[in-house]
Image (cartoon, grey):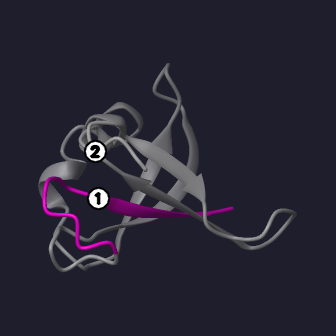
């Protein structure tokens, strides 16, 4: 059983090289994680069930990749969990 207070992330695509990698995040810290690796105003632009293109940045603020971020708030999410914002993140290589 998963602790509902934990934030988790997992690769949702097969291991190896590919054009797209899908990473699913769930839990109360999702938005905090996104705020650390995206431009400041990004999370305010995020809308439920809409893919939004964003630049992913490292700790120094340098661009390292682009990602399509889609937020599926509960209960209209795969898991139906009610508590928090659960964005699924698909990073384009």
* Label of residue 86 in the image: 1
User: Which residue shows up at 32% across the image and 72% down it?
Assistant: 79
Question: Residue 45, position in %: x, y?
Answer: 16, 60
Give the residue at mark 2: 4
In the foreground, 64 or 8: 8
Q: How crowded is mark 2: few (under 14 residues within 10 Å), some or many (20 or more)?
A: few
Q: In this view, does 45 lie above or below 55?
A: below
Q: In this view, does 7 lie above or below 82?
A: above
Question: Residue 87, position in %: x, y?
Answer: 33, 60
Between label 1 and label 2, give the one nearer the viewer: 2
In the foreground, 77 or 3: 3
Q: Main secondary structure of the magenta part?
A: loop
Residue 35 drawn in magenta: no
Question: Residue 33, position in %: x, y?
Answer: 36, 36
Would you say 57 lies left or right of 81 here? right
User: Which residue shows up at 34% across the image and 78% down it?
Assistant: 78
In which quarter of the view is residue 83 placed?
A: bottom left
User: Which residue shows up at 53% across the image and 57% down it?
Assistant: 66
Q: How crowded is mark 1: few (under 14 residues within 10 Å), some or many (20 or more)?
A: many
Q: Which span of residues is magenta-colored?
A: 79-93
Question: Residue 4, position in %: x, y?
Answer: 28, 44
Disc 1 to disc 2, how far (Cα)?
12 Å
In the foreground, 51 or 76: 76
Q: What element carries label 1?
A: loop
User: Which residue shows up at 23% across the image and 41% down it?
Assistant: 28
User: Which is nearer the N-term, disc 1 or disc 2?
Assistant: 2
**Which residue reaches farthest front?**
1
* Label of residue 8 in the image: none
Image label count? 2
């Amino acid at each position: 059983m998963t602790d509902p207070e934990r934030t988790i992330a997992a690769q949702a695509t097969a291991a190896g090289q590919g054009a797209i990698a899908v990473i699913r995040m769930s839990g109360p810290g999702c938005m905090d994680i996104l705020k650390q690796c995206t431009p400041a105003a990004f999370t305010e632009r995020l809308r439920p069930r809409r893919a939004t293109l964003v630049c992913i940045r490292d700790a120094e603020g340098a661009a390292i990749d682009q990602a399509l971020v889609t937020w599926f708030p509960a209960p209209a999410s795969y898991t139906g969990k009610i508590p928090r914002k659960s964005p699924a993140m698909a990073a384009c290589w």
